[in-house]
Amino acid sequence: MNKNIIELIGENGKKIYFNLEAELVYDGYDYQILTPIDSNMGLDSDEALVFRIENGEYYIEENDDIINEIEIMYNNQE
């Protein structure tokens, strides 16, 4: 499988595939910005999700302040 493709298991036990857009470190935590490959997630093609990675586990980031900081970091690296 392509290393830029991330496979996660959804709440319903189904596999969900994402494109890895960026890997960043913020406040001592590892984050990944992922865009869904499957449009059935209800997101537009230009929308992304921010995941915090701890011990190999993915946790969707819900804190708007952290998401905004990650977005600023991402935009400044290009």
Image: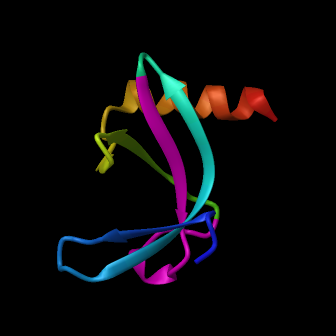
Location of residue 7 in the rendering, given as x and y in whole percent from the top left corner: 43, 71
The N terminus lies in which quarter of the figure?
bottom right
Tell me which residue sits at (63%, 27%) in the image.
Answer: 72
Asked where in the image residue 47 lies, by quadrant, the reply is bottom right
Q: Magenta stretch containing residue 40, yes or no?
A: yes
Callout count: 0
Q: 62 or 31: nearer the eye? A: 31
Tell me which residue sits at (72%, 33%) in the image.
Answer: 75
Residue ranking furthest to the right:
78
Tell me which residue sits at (18%, 71%) in the image.
Answer: 11
Left or right, residue 19 beside residue 55:
right
In the image, residue 27 above or below residue 68: above
Asked where in the image residue 28 lies, by quadrant, the reply is top left
Q: Magenta stretch containing residue 16, yes or no?
A: no
Location of residue 53 in the rendering, given as x and y in whole percent from the top left corner: 36, 41
Q: 15 or 69: nearer the eye? A: 15
Residue ranking furthest to the top:
27
Please provide the residue range marked out in magenta: 29-45
Tell me which residue sits at (43%, 83%) in the image.
Answer: 40
In the image, residue 19 above or below residue 60: below
